[in-house]
Amino acid sequence: MLKGLMAGATLALAALPAAAAAQEGEKFDCVVTSVAADTKASIGAAMAGAGDDAARDALFQQLSTVTDGCVAKHGIAEAQRAAYFDYSLARISREWLVGDIAKLNLSSAIVDKALDFGPTGANPDLSSDMSEDQIMAIVQAYIDNGVDIEKVDNAVWEKVGAYAAATSIYWNKRKQLPF
């Protein structure tokens, strides 16, 4: 019987990190999974420049309401609310832009590599404008991957830039969240 209790305790302790990781994943995913697909598409398009200020404000208010619900549900500190909102907004925008850029036969992974985005990347802060060096790194990376940049429309480059900005915010705000 003692062996059975010890084995049970060992299994329970082994499951704790997985349970904690699942809870952390739920916190990161809460806003994104709570927003309807059409609203996500509207947010992504708005972050790429579509719509007017009133439409964007309405979308941000919807997202803020969802964020507040997730903050309450998961006991996220009020001090983390702004970073959590920004992370969620950037994640929704980023995911939409990945798909939209792919439809245009461009890979967002090229931008990630060129600017060193990722969980262990440098993740440069692009909350203001991109530098000329960063823009050229993206352009050169596409050239190196066989893209004829002369055939890429300016509107597409704007989406690539929006993707880079959203990805920067995504990774930097994610690192600020304590879960």
Image (cartoon, helix red, strand yellow):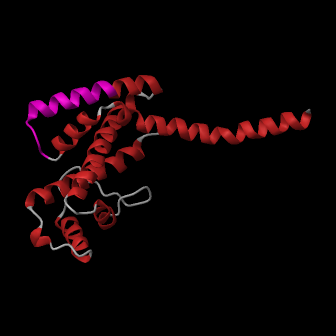
Q: Is residue 22 above or below residue 99?
A: above
Q: Quadrant of residue 125?
A: bottom left
Q: Position of residue 139 (x, y in %)?
A: 19, 69
Q: Identify the residue shown where x is 10% and y is 69%.
A: 151
* In the image, residue 55 lies in the stretch drawn in magenta: yes
Q: Identify the residue shown where x is 24% and y is 50%.
A: 97
Q: Is residue 58 above or below residue 45?
A: above
21 or 100: nearer the viewer: 100
Q: Identify the residue shown where x is 72% and y is 38%.
A: 13
102 or 3: nearer the viewer: 102
**Of helix, strand and loop, which mostly describes the magenta segment?**
helix
Q: The N terminus is located in which quarter?
A: top right
Q: Is residue 164 above or below residue 150?
A: above
Q: Quadrant of residue 65?
A: top left
In magenta, the rendered stretch is 49-66
Q: Quadrant of residue 70?
A: top left
Q: Position of residue 45 (x, y in %)?
A: 17, 43
Q: Position of residue 3 (x, y in %)?
A: 89, 38
- Residue 179 visible? The answer is no
